[in-house]
Image: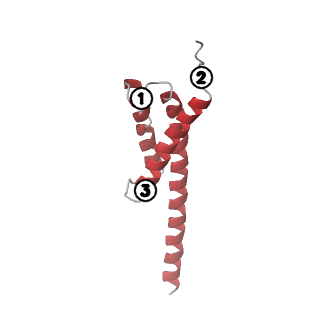
Amino acid sequence: MLLQFKLQLINEATANELWWRVLITCIATFLVNLPFGYMRGSFRKLSFWWFVFIHAPVPLIILIRKFHDLKLTWTLAPFLLGSFFLGQFVGRKMYAKYPLWKNKK
């Protein structure tokens, strides 16, 4: 009985640690994608550099996920993809509001 209780506490601690790792990974994914979304905002949609700035942070995200020892599963993928595209979207909106270079016409 006591052993079962200890195992239950260990499983709960592991589950709580897992969610912290997932949360930190999602925040890191969002923050990594902000500058790439910002840089992507200055290029025409579907151009070469537009694609580069979408796909360049992918290896960084894989490294972050490996660092936190998270395997890509169907339950983790929506969180990572959501934070990935949210970072790209917010970065793009930041460029629209505060462009690095202003066009003088």
* Residue marked by disc 3: 76
Mark in front: 3 vs 1: 1
Report x, y in % for residue 55.
40, 35
Q: Is any part of residue 70 visible from this angle?
A: no
Q: Check the image and report above or below for 45 versus 29.
A: above
Amino acid of disc 1: Lys
Rendered position, 73 above or below 61: below
Residue, disc 2: 100
- Name the residue rendered at 53%, 84% in the picture: 2
Mark number, residue 45 = 1
Dot placed on the residue nearer the N-terminal end, 2 or 3? 3
Work out which residue is located at the far front of the displayed protein and give it. Answer: 105
The mark lying in front, picked from 1 and 2, is: 1
Between residues 65 and 91, which one lies in front from this camera angle?
Answer: 91
Nearest to N terminus: mark 3 or mark 1: 1
Residue at image position (44%, 36%) is 57
